[in-house]
Image (cartoon, coloured by chain):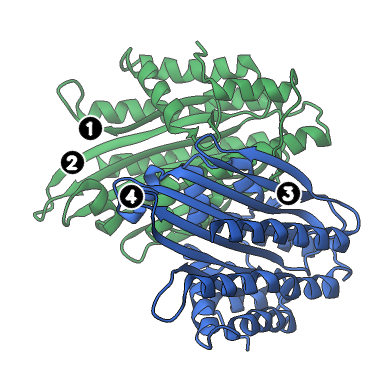
Chain colours: A blue, B green
């Protein structure tokens, strides 16, 4: 399974970066291949200063070896070996009318001292962070997520949509990071699903990514914008930074376990503003977005 | 003691903001008075878009009541009442040749169920974050810190300088946030010092702040700078954000205990950049700064 999924994310990285380069038309992804001293490594692909994407990364990594201390604590085990691989992406567009998107699909195995698999699971999801709300974009994104989920189980979309809303919650601001999507973790084999069925599900979601996001980018990327729209985007990007550095388990885990810093922090936006006590005017488009973030809603 | 120290920080806030406004010459501090539901409140003073200061805050607060859960855990007590007050300031200058400065001086009391003081202490310090290194500025700042310390005990400067270097350490970057200064905490009464002597020490440090920082601002604020210097300042401000959101105990404590968010996050810089894997050219002024941050040094 680990080889099969790693092959899958390698191909998906190629597919996604090729499509995004075509969409951007100006910038291309630069690739950095890195190694992890304790075992494994990754392939980081970053795009900067594009016509469409101001900054973005589509990264894969495969790490293995002895469980780092932080993971031993988290899983309540004394020792053991592990394998983890995944694809992570974040795209920060130039145009404030195009939403930021994040996605991640990953697989994890843990072994006993005879190298037998003790436990294995998939995790991941994708979520959208607009700066201006277009309801039809939110509906489109969630519909693609739901259609992919529905092929596997009718409960998946409502469950993983709800988990996404609660995970990407900027609790110190009392608002969501964005308008959500899917978030799932610890998808193990059980009475209902084999690990192969979990694989089929996660790759279905991965395969649906471009369809969920690209049409939105095409629709919005050429809207004329002013400095005030860009300012608002940069202020909201500040909330993105706050979430990633204060709350995001993946980011904090990476920072505290000697992950490759530049691959982890590629998720941070290229330009950001923090204004003191910034409040959008009542009735504005900006206020309309905030109202939706304060009360996550059903889009379908 | 609590009334005496609170009166002190009220006066110090007035002195510092008056001097900074005079220095800026363009912008003035806007004041927000806020109340804490559970007891106490604060007076936040923020300056934005000045001639010298792009953004800054000089805030005081006084909070009291039942110990919040996070503090009960931290101190290992089941229940109790507390009182805390302090002044916090952060100044982000326009000119990349002027360093950012942070300072904080605070006092804490905890009570038993008969309202007797069980324990009381002072904490605080001040530290400098330059974007370009002027050794004479670093020496000046540290000399003022040392002179203030030396009036109270010869051990104070070396000890609190070292604590500062280790506290403001951006461990995920393996570099210091800036070139340090002083950091001290839990200054209680003991065999050597009465609580009055602790008060005398902390107010000595507070009183030395303007002398430590203002001459540096005057010396550097009119240096001509280019877009590339501003870019570097904004990239380095990113590290400031990373420290405050990932590592700073005070910030995280505030965010997780329902502090007034806008007063806490006034410390974040006005404009920030994150570039992927940004490395200053070898031998540049930018690289010279980074080398010093990677290996904190003695300035005196």
Which element type, helix, strand or loop, lies under badge 1? loop
Q: Is residue B48 left or right of residue A80?
A: right
Give how far across and how far down residue B287 sits, in percent.
69, 23
Q: Is residue A71 above or below residue B25?
A: below
Q: CA distance from mark 1 to mark 3?
A: 52 Å
Write down the quadrant of residue B132 in the picture. top right
Q: Is residue A236 above or below residue A145?
A: above
Q: Chain of mark 3?
A: A
Kindly identify the residue that appears in the image at 59 percent across and 20 percent down: B292
Q: Is residue A129 left or right of residue A198?
A: right
Crowding at mark 4 (Cα within 10 Å: few <14, some 14-19, many 20+): few
Q: Chain of mark 4?
A: A
The residue that disc 3 covers is: A45
The residue that disc 1 covers is: B188
The residue that disc 4 covers is: A73
The residue that disc 2 covers is: B119
């Amino acid at each position: 399974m680990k080889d099969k999924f790693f092959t899958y994310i390698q191909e998906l990285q190629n597919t996604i970066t090729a499509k995004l380069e075509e969409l951007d038309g100006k910038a291309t992804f630069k690739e950095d291949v890195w190694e992890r001293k304790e075992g494994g490594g990754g392939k980081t692909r970053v795009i900067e200063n594009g016509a469409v994407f101001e900054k973005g990364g589509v990264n894969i990594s495969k790490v293995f070896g002895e469980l780092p201390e932080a993971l031993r604590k988290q899983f309540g085990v004394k020792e053991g070996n592990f394998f983890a691989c995944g694809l992570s992406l974040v795209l920060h567009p130039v145009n404030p009318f195009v939403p930021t998107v994040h996605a991640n699909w990953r697989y994890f195995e843990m072994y006993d001292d005879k190298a037998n698999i003790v436990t294995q699971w998939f995790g991941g999801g994708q979520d959208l962070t607009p700066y201006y709300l277009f309801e039809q974009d939110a509906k489109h994104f969630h519909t693609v997520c739901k259609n992919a989920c529905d092929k596997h189980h009718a409960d998946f979309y409502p469950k993983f949509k709800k988990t996404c809303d609660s995970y990407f919650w900027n609790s110190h601001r009392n608002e969501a990071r964005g308008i959500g999507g899917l978030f799932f973790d610890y998808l193990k084999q059980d009475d209902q699903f084999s690990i192969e069925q979990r694989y089929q599900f996660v790759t279905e979601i991965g395969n649906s990514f471009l369809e969920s996001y690209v049409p939105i980018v095409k629709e919005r990327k050429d809207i004329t914008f002013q400095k005030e729209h860009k300012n608002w985007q940069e202020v909201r990007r500040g909330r993105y930074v706050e979430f990633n550095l204060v709350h995001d388990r993946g980011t904090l885990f990476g920072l505290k376990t000697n992950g490759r810093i530049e691959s982890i922090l590629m998720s941070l936006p290229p330009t950001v503003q923090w204004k003191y006590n910034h409040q959008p005017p009542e009735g504005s488009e900006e206020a309309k977005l905030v109202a939706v973030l304060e009360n996550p809603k059903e889009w379908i």
